[in-house]
């Protein structure tokens, strides 16, 4: 019998239809709130962005109008939605309901702050259910500043005349190549300025950096060739002379391959977050070139062989930059808050390590004037001490009267020798001079002043012998290891073997020569430094001067001229005085120390000689005068020519400055 299906049973497909409808309804109920939240969130974010944009525009324009005197300070507080130019309806910058917008304007100096408050509906969907829905208030604030000052400070070494031989040699040596620019080429570069704003924009385009991103540009690696090439293009576009452009192109063609890239931020000390205002200044082309070459030298590790004409032979001069020169640019208002911090404005000369080696007959000939001291009491006293310690005796002191018929006597005899042509090695670590902006004042009547301070760093001078030969000494000077200074041997206390033969009171002397004898003392066998020796060395550190205030730079043509940053600053340079030990080595060399060599037979002669105070002091005094007489006329032109070219010679340094009190740029400060 067939079983019947219950009448109340429904087909499965009918149940599935109900579940689908229910699922769709649930999805709609979930999506509608999500859509409402997303829409309202996006709308509020858009309104906030639009309000902030209008606050920025209002602050920028109001600050600029206030700076230019269009709006006075008393009227700033009365400004509102209808009176702020950029918010006016005819400008069309604000697209919302002006009735719901309020504006508050305040200032601090030339900084203007605009606060905008704007009421909008809490929710668009909420208004469907509740037309009188409450409103929320959005707020945006912006501060802009105009008429900011810009200061530039520069430090240079005064070069009276351009010597293309020295400049080509020094700068070419730093690059490890030969430069062939003429006097006219260098002079044209010295006389030409370049606008940094134009230069930075062109360089940014050349190396693919976003225009205006100056912090990025200053920390981006760039080649020396690109620096010079862009400089030539910018100067040519600005109408510079053909001589200047040609000089740069000539210099560019001489740049060797393999020079490492550099970062301009290490030679241009520009404040962080620099704006167009900060870099819209003029800089000497020669400063840019020298600083770039010096920085490239430091990065490359090249030790420059510098040819400086001395009129004498056997002179080696080498140099290595340890810190390139810098020029400072920035806002003095920021610098005043912390002159030694990241916003400080300072300029410094380069730091250079110099090696000079002289192997000159002229030195020996001057030192031979010590021969006159051999018969002086101080040398006699030294001889007596040596004879006593070594158990020696001068042949002949026994007394000829004992030789009535004949006698032969042999003794080792002291032979004091002045070395004729010693090698003199000199190492100079010349620290930099730093000029720093302390404060700047701009008065309403147009008077402006800028105060700076100048300090010099530590300088070390070493004189002696730094290695077995010149090359070894040079490698030791420029290595990272501490320099070992050995004394220059000046007096060799040696011995010779003397035979005295007497017959009937008539005596003759002969000197050992190999297996035989000779009557010529100069040919005799000699035991060098058997009795020790005397040498000299100098290893001194001279502290630089602490900060010294300079006279204020002022914009008074009858006093010290303080130009705008886009004007020629040549007339602003003023000299400052510093106790510079490098300017003349004659005073520095008077600090030489006397060193005593130990005898080769190992007794304690050196220690005993050090105890003979009068002898040592007299000898040092005599050597001081002679060495300085011999070396200063040679070293001074070498050192001064080299350091002048590198801008290190602090004794001749000059500091220049420029100050623009109010520029036509405006920027947001928050």
Image: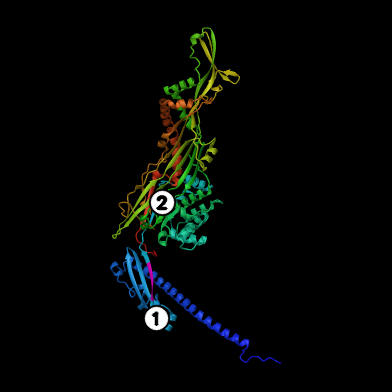
Which is more toward the observer, 129 or 193? 129
Q: Quadrant of the N terminus?
A: bottom right
Which is more toward the observer, 444 or 139? 139
Q: Earlier in the sequence, mark 1 or mark 2?
A: 1
Coloring scheme used: rainbow
Q: Circle 2 sits on which residue?
A: 347
Q: Position of residue 180 (x, y in %)?
A: 51, 48
Residue 74 visible to an observer of this rendering: yes
Label 1 close to label 2 by CB (< 8 Å) = no
Q: Position of residue 292 (x, y in %)?
A: 48, 52
Magenta region: which residues?
Answer: 136-142
Q: Position of residue 93 (x, y in %)?
A: 40, 75
Q: Position of residue 356 (x, y in %)?
A: 49, 39
Residue 395 position (above or below residue 9)? above
- Name the disc covering residue 133, or none: 1
Circle 1 or circle 2, nearest the eye? 1
Q: CA distance from mark 1 to mark 2?
A: 63 Å
Q: Residue at x 62, y 87 (%)?
A: 13
Q: Residue at x 49, y 80 (%)?
A: 32
Q: Is residue 136 left or right of residue 513?
A: left
């Amino acid at each position: 019998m067939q079983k019947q299906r219950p009448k109340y049973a429904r087909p499965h497909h009918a149940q599935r239809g109900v579940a689908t409808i229910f699922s769709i309804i649930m999805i709609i109920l979930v999506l509608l709130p999500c859509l409402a939240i997303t829409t309202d969130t996006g709308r509020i974010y858009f309104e906030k962005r639009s309000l902030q944009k209008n606050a920025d525009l209002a602050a920028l324009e109001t600050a600029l109008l206030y700076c230019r005197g269009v709006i006075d300070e008393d009227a700033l507080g009365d400004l509102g939605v209808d009176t702020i130019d950029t918010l006016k309806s005819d400008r069309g910058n604000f697209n919302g309901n002006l009735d719901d917008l309020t504006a508050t304007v305040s200032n601090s100096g030339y900084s203007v702050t605009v606060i905008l408050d704007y009421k909008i509906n809490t929710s668009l969907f909420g208004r469907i259910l509740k037309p009188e829905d409450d409103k929320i208030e959005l707020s945006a604030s912006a501060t802009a500043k105009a008429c900011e000052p810009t200061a530039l400070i520069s430090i240079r070494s005064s070069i009276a005349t351009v010597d293309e031989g020295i400049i080509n040699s020094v700068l070419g040596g730093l690059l490890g190549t030969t430069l062939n620019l003429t006097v006219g080429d260098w002079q044209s570069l010295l006389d030409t300025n370049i606008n940094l704003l134009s230069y930075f924009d062109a360089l940014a385009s050349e190396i693919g950096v976003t225009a205006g991103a100056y912090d990025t540009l200053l920390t981006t690696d760039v080649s020396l060739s690109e620096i010079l090439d862009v400089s030539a293009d910018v100067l040519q576009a600005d109408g510079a002379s053909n001589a200047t452009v040609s000089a740069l192109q000539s210099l560019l063609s001489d740049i060797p391959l393999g020079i490492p890239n550099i970062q301009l931020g290490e030679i241009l000390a520009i404040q962080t977050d620099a704006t167009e205002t900060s870099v819209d200044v003029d800089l000497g082309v020669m400063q840019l070139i020298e600083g770039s070459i010096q920085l490239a030298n430091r990065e490359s590790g090249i030790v420059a062989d510098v040819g400086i004409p001395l009129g004498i032979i056997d002179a080696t001069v080498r140099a290595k930059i340890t810190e390139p020169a810098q020029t400072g640019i920035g806002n003095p208002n920021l610098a005043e808050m912390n002159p030694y911090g990241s916003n400080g404005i300072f300029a410094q000369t380069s730091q250079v390590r110099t090696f000079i080696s002289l192997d000159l007959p002229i030195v020996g000939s001057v030192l031979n004037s010590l021969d006159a001291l051999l018969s002086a009491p101080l040398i006699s006293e030294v001889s007596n001490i040596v004879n006593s310690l070594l158990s020696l005796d001068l042949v002949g002191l026994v007394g000829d009267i004992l030789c009535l018929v004949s006698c032969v006597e042999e003794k080792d005899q002291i032979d004091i020798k002045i070395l004729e042509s010693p090698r003199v090695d000199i190492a100079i670590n010349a620290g930099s001079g730093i000029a720093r902006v302390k404060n700047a004042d701009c008065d309403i009547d147009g008077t402006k002043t800028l105060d700076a301070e100048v300090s010099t760093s530590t300088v070390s001078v070493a004189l002696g012998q730094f290695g077995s030969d010149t090359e070894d000494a040079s490698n030791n000077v420029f290595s990272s290891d501490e320099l070992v200074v050995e004394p220059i041997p000046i007096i060799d206390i040696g011995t010779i073997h003397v035979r005295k033969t007497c017959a009937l009171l008539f005596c003759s002397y002969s000197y050992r020569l190999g297996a035989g004898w000779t009557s010529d003392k100069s040919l005799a066998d000699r035991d060098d430094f058997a009795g020790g020796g005397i040498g000299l060395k100098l290893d001194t550190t001279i502290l630089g001067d602490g900060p010294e205030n300079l006279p204020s730079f002022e914009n008074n043509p009858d006093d010290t001229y303080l130009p705008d940053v886009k004007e020629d600053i040549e007339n602003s340079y003023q000299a400052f005085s510093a106790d510079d030990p490098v300017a003349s080595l004659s005073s520095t060399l008077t600090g030489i120390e006397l060193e005593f060599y130990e005898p080769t037979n190992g007794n304690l002669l050196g220690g005993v000689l050090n105890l003979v105070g009068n002898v040592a002091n007299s000898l040092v005094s005599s050597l001081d005068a002679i060495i300085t007489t011999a070396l200063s006329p040679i070293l001074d032109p070498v050192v001064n020519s080299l350091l002048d070219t590198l801008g290190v010679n602090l004794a001749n340094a000059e500091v220049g400055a420029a100050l623009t009190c109010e520029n036509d740029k405006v920027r947001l400060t928050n």
